Amino acid sequence: NAGVMQNPRHLVRRRGQEARLRCSPMKGHSHVYWYRQLPEEGLKFMVYLQKENIIDESGMPKERFSAEFPKEGPSILRIQQVVRGDSAAYFCASSSRTHPTGTRNEQFFGPGTRLTVL
Amino acid sequence: RKEVEQDPGPFNVPEGATVAFNCTYSNSASQSFFWYRQDCRKEPKLLMSVYSSGNEDGRFTAQLNRASQYISLLIRDSKLSDSATYLCVVNMGSGTSYGKLTFGQGTILTVHP
């Protein structure tokens, strides 16, 4: 499967626990984006990363949320001390390039991780 | 005003019908535009990019009017399998924020026999 991979597909956590969501981009893609979709709402941008760098985290909540994309391995979205309001679908997307010149930055999405906080 | 605004529908049409969706965006400096579709509880899938001159892919035609900040999607000869939520998506960023896509709320389409 050469598509964007995410795991786990479903994650259940109790309030106060930590959630770790993983994303492996499509082969050949070095740009990763995380989006969140709350129940009955549209997708909202959270963070954009390249290998070892956070490029834009303007959509990330200031506390409890962090993201990384190490040199080796998948991108990780980490949510500490989860609360019920964190229950949502978290989608990862990847693209091959992002510079405005000569590319439309088409992003391809993984199947998502559905986080439920009890 | 929402950054990307769509008529949420729902649109209920018979097979074979032609249906059009509209979308407006707030940032005149937006650089690229897309239509995605999302099936219930699944990931968004890229349907087509939208080019300034308009473009067509089979039964789907997309148009962009930069002066009016308006995007449209036309679906001809609707199939049952076209039933989904259609998302208008805009890349409004520049520089480091170029990676950020802004999504509309989506327009729900149901095609019935």
Image (cartoon, coloured by chain):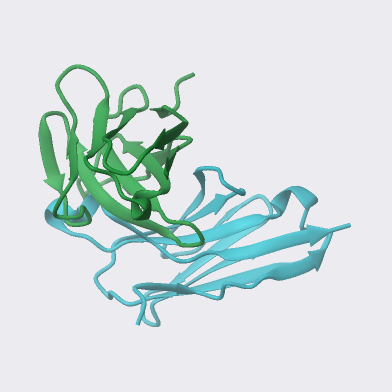
Does A58 sit above or below residue A32?
A: below
Does B5 sit above or below residue B48?
A: below
Image position of A26 (left or right of A52) = right
Q: Who is closer to the viewer here, A29 or B113?
A: B113
Image position of B21 (left or right of A48) = right
Question: In this view, which residue lies farthest toward the right?
Answer: B113
Does B19 sit above or below residue A100?
A: below
Give the image quarter of residue B20: bottom right
Q: Position of residue B58 (x, y in %)?
A: 66, 50
Q: Count the marks.
A: 0
Image position of B94 (left or right of A84) = left
Q: Which color has been applied to chain B in this rendered view?
A: cyan
Give the image quarter of residue A117: top left
Image position of A77 (left or right of B9) = left
Q: Chain drawn green, letter?
A: A
Q: Quadrant of the C terminus of chain B?
A: bottom right
Can I make out residue B63 in this image? Answer: yes
Residue at 34% from the left image edge and 48% from the top image edge = A35
